[in-house]
Image (cartoon, rainbow, N blue to C red):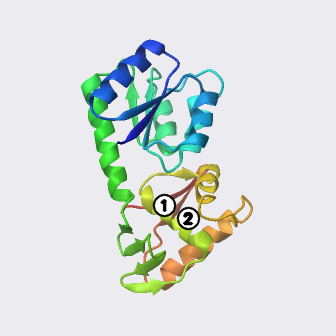
Amino acid sequence: MKQILVVDDDQHIGNLLEEALAAEGYGVRRAYSGTEAAMSLEKEKPDLVLLDLMLPGLSGEDLLPKFAGIPVIVVSAKVGIDDKVKLLLGGAVDYVTKPFVLRELLARVAVQLRRALVADGAVLSAGALRLDVDAHALTVDGVPVRLTKTEYAILKLLLQNPGRAISKSAMLDRISLDTPDCTDASLKQHVSNLRRKLREAGGQDCIEAVWGIGFRLSTE
């Protein structure tokens, strides 16, 4: 059963979402503040997050980097284009404005969970890149490429989130699950080494630096 974390301090909206999601066969966890959501994440990783922005304690904007690698749909009353663009570039996979149409929101949840199911497969691929997660093995156009543990963790995260800009802090948080060897000071060098290896193997330079945010795997 897919587990969805609903982060919203509005009890009425939370109850509505919990009832609708449960009726679709999802498991639902609730958090009523940013701090509670962060604590919930430490205990168990959800499959998807529905995230309000205006929360007690940590704001939704503060929480978003902590959910790197987990699909996050922002559900907010903020309607400004700048707000939407900032959150989408910052790692959210979708943005739904309150008041929302419940059927549409449920459809967006289903779409993101399908995408995550594909991304969590034993083989991650993009263009000429093919990463066998079980074997920790990368090939570029069929040519094996040796990666360090840290380079593997970085590429795995990028392949799991194609086209999404991942902040440096979020990247460090997520790859720490695979390796303790990357720090804020060394991240740029690890990415540079990875890009060089991909180019030398004949692959395109598909890892893009996103100014002021972090890095993204190009889907072009």
Camera-side residue of 217 and 82? 217
Taking the spot 71% from the left edge, 66% from the top edge, the residue there is 186
Q: Is residue 185 left or right of residue 207?
A: right
Mark 2 surroundings within 10 Å by alpha-carbon count, few (fewer than 14), some (14 through 19), many (20 or more): many
Taking the spot 41% from the left edge, 43% from the top edge, the residue there is 93
Percent x, y of residue 203: 43, 78
Q: Is residue 136 above or below residue 18?
A: below
Circle 2: residue type:
Ile
Percent x, y of residue 122: 38, 67
Circle 1: residue type:
Leu
Q: Answer yes or no: do the residues labelled 1 and 2 have beta carbons within 8 Å?
A: yes
Residue labelled with disc 1? 158
Q: Which mark is residue 25?
A: none
Taking the spot 46% from the left edge, 26% from the top edge, the residue there is 80
Cα separation, mark 1 vs mark 2, equals 6 Å
Q: Secondary structure at mark 1?
A: helix
Percent x, y of residue 166: 54, 52
Camera-side residue of 34 and 90? 34
Q: Secondary structure at mark 2?
A: helix
Residue labelled with disc 2? 154
Camera-side residue of 218 and 67? 67
